[in-house]
């Protein structure tokens, strides 16, 4: 059987689809590509929200995964929006001179900034996590933090906050993965609450089961750093929502184009925050959670 | 859909064979698996619609228990007995809540990880033969009172829910050995590992002892020896879906005493009975979104008992002086249970928590002895259940539940539950609740037929029949019914370090089933003797108060105490003495105290004291007014632990001393002698435990 007609049809369809894609960009004021690190709900929501905001400003963006960076490369001036550390690193490997707005929870060590690169840091200020603990239960006076060498700066910042809040923060260093469980047991036994921080070496989908189950077995609450962490079993978290990230990113991008393809600042951060709570876990641990509105008010009132 | 790659990972147990670097790209934005879902969470006592006691890992260890029933002594209202009777039956560990129990404690549901394990043939649980290791248990929750809408069939007077640990919590090697008097030798080895999204553990164990001693100090014929393998795999398919697969296989050899009852014509010999107990469970937990999740669960239970013997010589001197003969009896049986269940959890708004579900269960028992002459019986049970918890505001909660249940041979039964909780603040809650539940007759009660007789035809005319038991079925049995009302209080004091739970209750039981020996049988044309028949005959009322206290004194001492005051009355007395049997089937007073203390990092210890008032088990009541043949007894247990740490290895050695006070009998079942057949006396053993993470 001759397959040429079928191939021709496929080629035509592909051409139509691609031309549609280019048409989209052709109508756009600027060429923008959003690169996401993973297929997580959070990344999808963030990417979609950014695209939606850009559309409202008259710009069109395409969303791709890190695997498609090379194949989607265009010979036109492009602004990349990289979401997550993996996308940032892959994009840097692909084109270290590219225009990139890098959305990440922390500053990647060794970053060299110029007017073509800027970071939007999504992590909430460290003190806000401490304030969340105080807002939920002022009696949680001893707080455990597990930290690897990658997150010592966060632990140090948290320590400063706890001094102001009259809390006792105990940092437990994890040098090796084999130490995690043993150190976790000690940390949970000796403190009233475990505060999780963004350290993928310690908190990832492989370890979170053990951490949450161990804490639950000791009837100790875990304060997370994301909505996903709360759904997994943390009692509460204060985090930056996809909507807030998208809003801030859209403003930065708008300013970037107004400034003739130059970022005004090296590092941006978001001011807004969201609160997530897990009432089922809290109820099981006999913790009476204040309403989200009440927690928000309490956090906003704190200096 | 599960991909082939997932399947390969699922069956791959050794990290060296499979490895993954899937976490290299994880960051703050990554999805995390749902770990603490609705069904894995422990219900807080201040939010529960019924009284719930929870025995956690620390209490289990501190109790020094080698068997689960020993731990259950801590629950108010629960009595534990070692049944050794004069019928020549297999010795059993019996756990009863609020009396009404013979050696088969029928009015209670027992679950392991949501898998109902009561025996479909006779009811009750053979605690010697549960293939589960006490060290794999995370906690034991005991619901005191009926709660059928949550736990299903047979959740009548109480529910014992044994929850094992997630495989992720038992990583590395664990070994334990107990050795002591009474020929105690227990050994356990467990290995837990992880391979990416798969956590697994395998446990091998053996438990052995020579049972109890006779009152004269000689060893009774009730040795127990068991071996088992138990495994669990938890596989995270993705962040929203998890599969759990558990399985076990256990085999128990138990000695049984010969029939001592003189009037029994057919006497069982002293013998060994072999029991096999196995299961497979597959469970899928899925989180749809923040508001919804569901569980699909299938399990299969298998029980087999081998009890074939030749009777002791039967005295046939009525036919010919000095004539004796024997006969072969095979009282073996096998049973199977298949259960498929779907439960859907919905939180439409923050204040409302809903759950509903469907289940179907198939029980089948094969036995030529218990189902003479057909050889088998089976039953289908279908359930539809739902519950709603509505937090009206921070002070008021309403909890509703209902179960519709239809079993072959019975009408559709409805088991409703309602509770109103008033929270004065986050430390004090009052609960008013009412609930109803049913107990469907077990297969033997419903349709069992035993013709345990020996027929002599060649020497006499007419034929002479010698009998042990004859049971005939009753076609129109109804379910037993319980209506329970209670007023409960749960409070926290002393900066929430002391929790106190108490309740005043009244349980009204009706249509209680008993085996009635007064009817002539039509089972066999040649037989015109007395046969037993199960009938719904009695009603009782149980009133009482239960108190439970858990007090953490500083960081190194914990005191757990519970007590119960009970009164059982039965006005309905078609046959003389039966009411008294119910009324005396539980102690009026009972008390449990367990204290544990960490002296320092190296030394810790615990002391347990138990007081049980006098009572008579239902199949052991002497029917003498004012006489309860299981007298008051007190138990004092002691456990001293020395801990060692070597890097990642933790070694501990403990001395466990049990029954330090007077010898006692907790199940005096000899009706015709003043002395109990067995007694509990000093048990002493050394425990060695090694954990390498």
Image (cartoon, coloured by chain):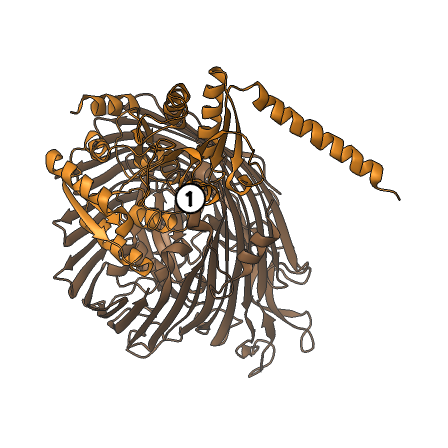
Q: Residue at x 40, y 18 (%)?
A: A258
Q: Nearer the viewer, residue B238 or B66?
A: B238
Q: Residue A103's x, y, as percent?
A: 38, 34
Q: Is residue B187 visible?
A: yes
Which image quarter holds the C terminus of chain B? bottom left
Q: Is residue B128 placed above or below B57 in the rendered structure?
A: below
Q: Quadrant of residue A106?
A: top left
Q: Chain of mark 1?
A: A
The picture's colour for chain B is: brown
Q: Residue A208's x, y, as percent?
A: 37, 47
Q: Residue A226's x, y, as percent?
A: 35, 35
Q: Residue at x 50, y 71 (%)?
A: B273
Which image quarter holds the N terminus of chain B? top right
Chain in orange, by letter, is A
Q: Nearer the viewer, residue A261 or B331?
A: A261
Report the side of B194 relative to A291 (left or right). Answer: right
Q: Counting other residues with Cα less than 10 Å from the Cα at mark 1, is it few (<14), some (14-19), or many (20 or more)?
A: some
Mark 1, residue position: A89
């Amino acid at each position: 059987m001759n397959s040429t007609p079928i191939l021709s049809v496929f080629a035509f369809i592909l051409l139509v689809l691609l031309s549609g894609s280019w048409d989209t960009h052709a109508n756009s004021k600027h060429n923008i590509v959003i690169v996401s690190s993973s297929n997580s709900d959070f990344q999808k929501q963030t990417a979609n929200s950014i695209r939606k905001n850009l559309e409202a400003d008259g710009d069109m963006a395409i969303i791709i995964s890190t695997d498609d960076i090379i194949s989607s490369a265009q010979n036109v001036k492009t602004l990349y929006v990289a979401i997550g550390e993996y996308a940032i690193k892959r994009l840097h490997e692909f084109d270290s001179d590219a225009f990139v707005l890098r959305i990440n929870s922390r500053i990647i060590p060794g970053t060299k900034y110029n007017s073509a690169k800027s970071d939007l840091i999504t992590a909430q200020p460290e003190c806000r996590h401490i304030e969340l603990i105080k807002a939920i239960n002022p009696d949680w006076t001893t707080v455990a933090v597990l930290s690897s060498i990658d997150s010592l700066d966060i632990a140090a910042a948290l320590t400063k906050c706890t001094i102001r809040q009259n809390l006792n923060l105990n940092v437990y260093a994890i040098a090796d993965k084999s130490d995690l469980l043993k150190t976790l047991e000690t940390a949970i036994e000796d403190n009233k609450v475990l505060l999780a921080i963004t350290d993928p070496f310690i908190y990832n989908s492989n370890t979170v089961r053990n951490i949450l189950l161990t804490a639950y077995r000791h009837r100790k609450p875990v304060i997370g750093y994301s909505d996903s962490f709360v759904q997994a079993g943390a009692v509460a978290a204060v985090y930056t929502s996809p909507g807030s990230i998208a809003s801030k990113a859209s403003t930065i991008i708008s300013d970037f184009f107004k400034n003739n393809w130059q970022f005004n600042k090296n590092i941006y951060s978001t001011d807004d925050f969201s609160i997530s709570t897990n009432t089922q876990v809290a109820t099981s641990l006999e913790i009476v959670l204040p309403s989200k509105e009440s927690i928000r008010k309490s956090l906003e009132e704190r200096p | 859909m599960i991909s082939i790659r997932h399947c390969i990972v699922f069956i791959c147990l050794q990290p060296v064979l499979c490895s993954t670097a899937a976490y290299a790209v994880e960051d703050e934005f990554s999805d995390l698996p749902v770990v603490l879902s609705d069904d894995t969470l422990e219900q807080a006592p201040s939010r529960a619609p019924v009284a719930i006691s929870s025995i956690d890992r620390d209490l289990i260890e501190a109790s020094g228990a080698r068997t689960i029933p020993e731990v259950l002594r801590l629950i108010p209202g629960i009595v534990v007995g070692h049944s050794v009777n004069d019928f020549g039956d297999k010795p059993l560990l019996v756990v009863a809540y609020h009396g009404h129990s013979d050696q088969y404690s029928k009015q209670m549901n027992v679950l392991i990880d949501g898998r109902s394990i009561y025996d479909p043939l006779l009811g009750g649980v053979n605690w010697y033969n549960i293939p589960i290791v006490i060290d794999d248990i995370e906690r034991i929750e005991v619901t005191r009172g009926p709660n059928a809408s949550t736990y299903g069939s047979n959740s009548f007077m109480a529910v014992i829910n044994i929850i094992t640990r997630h495989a992720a919590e038992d990583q590395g090697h664990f070994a334990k050995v107990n050795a002591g008097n009474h020929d105690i030798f227990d050994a356990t080895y467990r290995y837990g590992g992880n391979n990416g999204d798969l956590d697994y553990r395998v446990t091998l164990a053996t438990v052995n002892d020579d049972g109890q001693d006779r009152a004269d100090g000689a060893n009774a014929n009730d040795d127990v020896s068991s071996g088992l393998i138990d495994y669990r795999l938890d596989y995270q398919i993705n962040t929203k879906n998890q599969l759990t697969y558990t399985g076990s296989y256990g085999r128990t050899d138990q000695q049984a005493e010969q029939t001592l009852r003189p009037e029994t014509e057919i006497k069982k010999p002293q013998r060994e009975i072999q029991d096999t107990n196995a299961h497979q469970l597959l469970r899928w937990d899925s989180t749809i979104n923040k508001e919804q999740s569901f569980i699909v669960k299938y399990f299969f239970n298998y029980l087999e008992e081998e009890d074939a013997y030749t009777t002791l010589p039967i005295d046939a001197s009525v036919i010919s002086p000095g004539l004796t003969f024997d006969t072969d009896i095979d009282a073996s049986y096998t049973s199977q249970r298949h259960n498929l269940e779907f439960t859907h959890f919905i939180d439409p708004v923050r204040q409302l928590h809903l759950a509903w579900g469907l289940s179907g269960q198939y029980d089948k028992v094969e036995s030529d002895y218990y189902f003479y002459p057909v050889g088998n019986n089976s039953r289908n049970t279908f359930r539809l259940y739902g519950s709603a918890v509505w937090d009206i505001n921070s002070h008021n909660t309403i909890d509703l539940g209902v179960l519709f249940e239809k079993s072959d041979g019975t009408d559709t039964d409805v088991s409703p539950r309602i509770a109103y909780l008033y929270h004065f603040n986050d430390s004090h809650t009052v609960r008013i609740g009412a609930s109803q539940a049913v107990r469907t007759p077990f297969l033997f009660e419903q349709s069992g037929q035993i013709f345990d007789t020996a027929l002599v035809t060649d020497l006499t005319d007419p034929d002479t029949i010698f009998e042990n038991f004859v049971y005939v079925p009753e076609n129109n049995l109804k379910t037993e019914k319980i209506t329970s009302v209670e007023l409960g209080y749960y409070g926290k004091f002393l900066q929430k370090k002391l929790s106190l739970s108490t309740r005043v209750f009244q349980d009204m039981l009706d249509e209680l089933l008993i085996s009635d020996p007064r009817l002539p049988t039509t089972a066999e044309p040649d037989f015109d003797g007395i046969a037993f028949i199960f009938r719904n005959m009695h009603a009782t009322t149980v009133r009482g108060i239960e108190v439970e206290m858990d007090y953490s004194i500083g960081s190194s001492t914990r005191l757990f105490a519970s007590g119960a005051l009970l009164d059982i009355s039965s006005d309905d007395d078609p046959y003389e003495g039966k009411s008294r049997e119910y009324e005396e089937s539980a102690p009026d007073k009972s008390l449990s105290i367990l204290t544990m203390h960490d002296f320092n990092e190296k030394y810790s210890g615990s002391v347990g004291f138990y007081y049980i008032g006098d009572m008579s088990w239902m199949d052991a009541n002497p029917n003498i007014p004012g006489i309860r043949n299981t007298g008051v007894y007190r138990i004092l247990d002691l456990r001293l632990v020395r801990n060692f740490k070597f890097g990642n290895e933790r070694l501990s050695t403990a001395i466990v001393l049990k029954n330090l006070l007077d010898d006692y009998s907790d199940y005096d079942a000899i009706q015709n002698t003043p002395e109990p057949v067995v007694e509990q006396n000093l048990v002493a053993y050394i425990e060695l435990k090694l954990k390498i993470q």
